Image (tube, helix red, strand yellow):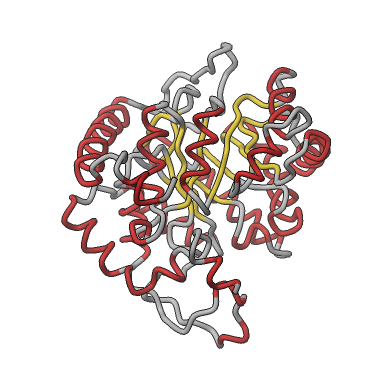
Amino acid sequence: MEQNERSQKRFDRRTFIGTSMAATLAVAAKSTSAQTENAPIARDSKGRPLPYNPRTYQAMPTRNLGQTGHRVGIFSLGGQAVIETSNRTEAEAVINKAIDLGVNYIDTASSYGGGKSEQHIGPVMKHRRHEVYLATKTHDRSYDGSMRLLEQSLERLQTDHLDCWQLHNVQTKEHTDRIFAKDGAIKALEKARDQRIVRFLGITGHYDPFILIEAVNQYPFDTLLMAFNAADKHQYSFIEHLLPVALEKKMGIIGMKVATRGRMLSTWTPPPLDEQPKRMATNKPGTITMKESLFYNFSIPVSTNIIGCDNHHQVEENVKWASEFTPYNSAVMAKLEDRCKSIVNQGLYFRKGIIDRLKS
């Protein structure tokens, strides 16, 4: 089915964002005001206590992570940027600062930094595992390969369990066919869940919203990690096509690529083209601020947004903005989208049609 045919079935975008955003944020505001540092520790559907950071509820608005039972702050920490580099000291400082300031969700992947991300998160988890919801990913599409990665991830992260194990960056039908085969990765996820090594199962993607729609219709994943930002509407929109499906299924929805590693920001100065990765190379600065990027994503009805930080000052800044968040109305959202039209290639370099063109 072509994109324009699928588009006939999608929600009216402005009505959808307006009504869903208003409902989500009203509930979030009410729930946040009712929470205190003495709020009871939540439990999952099997009665097991969920991670609990008592600082979260005073630090920022919180929202339900789908039907997991976990309430998550609207700003969460992504395991890239400095966390996936060789700078272990700064990486651990960023992670500890985030938890100290109320972040209660950390996302990583077995492939980030060739394993460095998990290795840097591990020493912090050794002492603070109970304070954060911890998610990682398998990029292997097979049962055997994913089970090997799980064992490796648990060792690196210095934990005996994950709150969520996710299928990493599912892009094509070939990926889903392999994942859902008899010896596919989904069997590894199910086994790990049945053995209580992981609590919840998730799927992630940047590339094609329609492949992810097919996947979540095929399997009852608990969470969806999806890439979107203020440029999203200009190319295979995840907000228009995928988000309504995930909301209808009451999934925990996590946003990523909020500022596309800074490339959407007006403060970003492009380095020489020959010093940039070819698929992301550009000589254009961004067009919006980090606060605008965050508030745009916060204004979409998702549970939280993960952001990689280069240093602890960025963590502090992001938590501050999360604490000050008030939702943008549709007119402000539309203006930000228009400002990002000229930088769509760098804002959505990972999206179908753009990454394919840049590779050619």
Q: Quadrant of residue 259?
A: bottom left
Which is nearer the eye, 68 or 213?
213
At which x and y percent is residue 254? Answer: 47, 42
107 over 182 or under it: above or below: below
220 over 237 or under it: above or below: above
Q: Quadrant of residue 152?
A: top right
Query: What residue do we see at 31% from left, 61% from top?
Result: 292
The quadrant in which the C terminus is found is bottom right
Which is nearer the eye, 316 or 290?
290
At which x and y percent is residue 249? Answer: 42, 26
225 over 64 or under it: above or below: below
The quadrant in which the N terminus is found is top left
Which is nearer the eye, 352 or 63?
352
182 over 138 or under it: above or below: above
Q: Quadrant of residue 86?
A: bottom right
Relative to 99, 112 lies left or right: right
Relative to 80, 354 lies left or right: left
Query: What residue do we see at 37% from left, 64% from top?
Result: 290
Q: Can residue 220 be seen at all in this image of the molecule?
A: yes
Which is nearer the eye, 61 or 342?
342
Query: What residue do we see at 42% from left, 34% from top?
Result: 246
At which x and y percent is residue 46? Answer: 58, 12
Query: What residue do we see at 26% from left, 34% from top?
Result: 29
At which x and y percent is residue 174? Answer: 66, 45
Q: Can residue 123 be seen at all in this image of the molecule?
A: no
Relative to 333, 356 lies left or right: right
